[in-house]
Amino acid sequence: MAEREYTTDVVVIGAGPVGLFAVFELGLLDMKCHLIDILDRPGGQCTELYPEKPIYDIPGFPVVSGQELTDNLMKQIEPFGAQFHFNRIVNGLAKLADGTFKVTTDDEDVFYAKVVVIAAGGGSFQPKRPPVEGIEDFEGKSVFYSVRRMEEFRDQDIVIVGGGDSALDWTLNLQPIARSMTLVHRRDAFRAAPASVNEMKALVAEGKMDLVLGQVGKLEGENGQLSAVNIKTSDGEDIRIPATRLLPFFGLTMKLGPVADWGLDLNDNLITVDTEKFESSVPGVFAIGDINWYPGKLKLILSGFHESALMAQAAKKIVSPDERVVFQYTTSSTKLQKKLGVA
């Protein structure tokens, strides 16, 4: 597969609330952003781990859910046209001779930017591997933990395992193009949106897919290619389901990941930054939100918002070193209001 190349002012690694607000602060100063995230949607742990859980310490919102906060932030940054790249891990960061950063992902993306902002929370969310013997032999060939290109699943016998939003969303998205679709969950109770569950059950009732209550046992296949999945049903029965693709959605775990190898000063697996610019030990690489450390650090979303504002001021001096920046308020600056589309 050929590399895809992008040139931008800033690459933001992490599309959680702090990464999203960074786009707003950078956009006010006319900097363009590309965001990269391992998840398949914006919001980070707010939407992945507790989309409906109430948050009480966001200024101006007595209570807001993780999903509502994310939706509002996405609406807030609409004027700035940020580009998102989901289902990707940043696996390389290098500084070129001219000072530009080269950022690469595991999906053959190459980004060239003057500034890199790491807003990756506690690290990258990585999928939990189900306790199935020999599953490693099939990973990346016929067992996948995310869907990057739907077309690769066309005319396949697909088994999806899980009961959350990701499992239900991909069941509904892939069912129309699959040769066969089976959803496996350990019980007849789901954590996903009720509308998605109802739609899935309607497809089952129409005979367009199968729902099996139970747990995955042995996998069959050779040379990395799956041929069948064996299920121990909740009734104690052993059944065999033909399968050429398996998508387990067993939740996520936090790992620092490749960030640990980028030559940044770390403090207990967190990136050490100053409190003036929130810049790391590598000039031009900033860290904001839960991924950073400095004396007195509080792991709060509102702290990350503050860090985003100061980071953006410093980033502007790198992106446009010859431009004089006059600090302005959105309440009184017609120029800023025009950028936001509210003037």
Image (tube, rainbow, N blue to C red):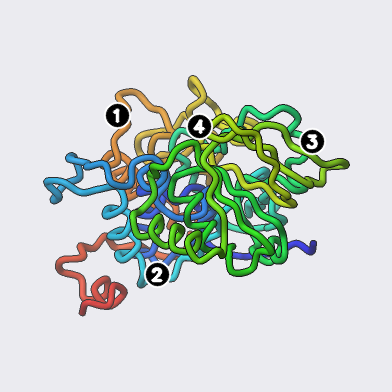
Q: Label 2 amino acid?
A: Phe
Image quadrant occupied by the C terminus: bottom left
For the point 59% across and 57% down, the residue is 113
Which callout, 2 or 1, points at the residue further toward the start of the chain? 2
Would you identify the image quadrant in which residue 56 lies?
top left
Measured in 3D between alpha carbons, the distance from the residue under mark 4 to the one under mark 1, in whole angstroms, is 19 Å
Measured in 3D between alpha carbons, the distance from the residue under mark 4 to the one under mark 3, in whole angstroms, is 23 Å
Foreground disc of the pair 1, 3? 3
Residue at image mark 3: 137
Measured in 3D between alpha carbons, the distance from the residue under mark 4 to the one under mark 2, in whole angstroms, is 30 Å
Q: Percent from the top left, x then y, of residue 105?
A: 66, 50
Measured in 3D between alpha carbons, the distance from the residue under mark 3 to the one under mark 2, in whole angstroms, is 43 Å
Foreground disc of the pair 4, 3? 3
Residue at image mark 2: 80
Q: Percent from the top left, x then y, of residue 61?
A: 15, 50
Residue at image mark 4: 254
Which callout, 4 or 3, points at the residue further toward the start of the chain? 3
Q: Label 3 amino acid?
A: Asp
Q: Secondary structure at mark 2?
A: helix
Would you identify the image quadrant in which residue 119 lies?
top left
Q: Residues within 10 Å of mark 2 (few under 14, many from 20)?
A: some
Q: Secondary structure at mark 3?
A: helix
Mark number displayed over residue 298: 1
Please state which of residues 257 and 234 is positioned toward the viewer in this rendering.
Answer: 234
Which callout, 1 or 3, points at the residue further toward the start of the chain? 3
For the point 66% across and 43% down, the residue is 91
